[in-house]
Image: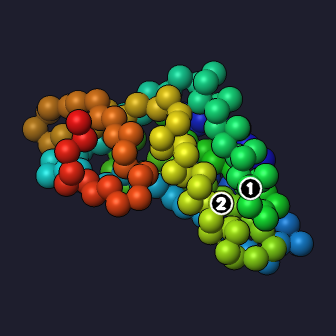
Amino acid sequence: MSFSVSNTPIDAQAAKKAVQDRHCGAFVAFEGWIRDHNEGQAVERLEYEVYRPLAEKEGARIIGEALARFAISHALCIHREGLLELGEMAVIVCVSAAHRGPAFDACRYIIDEVKTRLPIWKKEHYVGGVSEWVNCENCAVAGHAHGEHHG
């Protein structure tokens, strides 16, 4: 199991099936979807740009860390690149384990690390034609609220 980048829609059922294991009693997934707003702005669509060589290498490292750190059997993460419309899935993390606790912990660890460590840039396209690249290195930090200044 590993990390990958996709320029086509993510198949959540295939991702789930990839981590299924008869020895596991727990499955946890996180899906990140494109929403219609961010920090007071009406969002029309998003665009992700990924530096694949580094993202795939570091993403695989994150999955390996989760496998070593938590009592889980399988884990994967797929992140989209390119232009995405409202409601589309931008990222999925799937984890299976014997028990739910480690599965939840590992899933949270993977998505938080992916959001802070990978070279993935997000461009928000707002209603009205304006767009801007956004980079929020603090979003996965506990206690960070989106109303806070991102300085």
Inspect the image, locate mark 2, and give the three-letter code of the amino acid beneath it. Answer: Ala
The C terminus, quarter of image: top left
State the residue in front, 16 or 98: 98
Instruction: Name the residue tied to disc 1.
Output: 69
Colouring of the image: rainbow
Q: Which mark is residue 106?
A: 2
1 or 2: mark nearer the eye: 1
Left or right of residue 77: residue 80 = left
State the residue in front, 144 or 26: 144
- Percent position (x, y) of residue 147? 19, 54
Q: Of helix, strand and loop, which one carries label 1? A: helix
Q: Relative to 116, is 16 above or below?
A: below
N-terminal of the pair, mark 1 or mark 2, is 1
Left or right of residue 76: residue 148 = left
Q: Quadrant of residue 7?
A: top right
State the residue in front, 8 or 74: 74
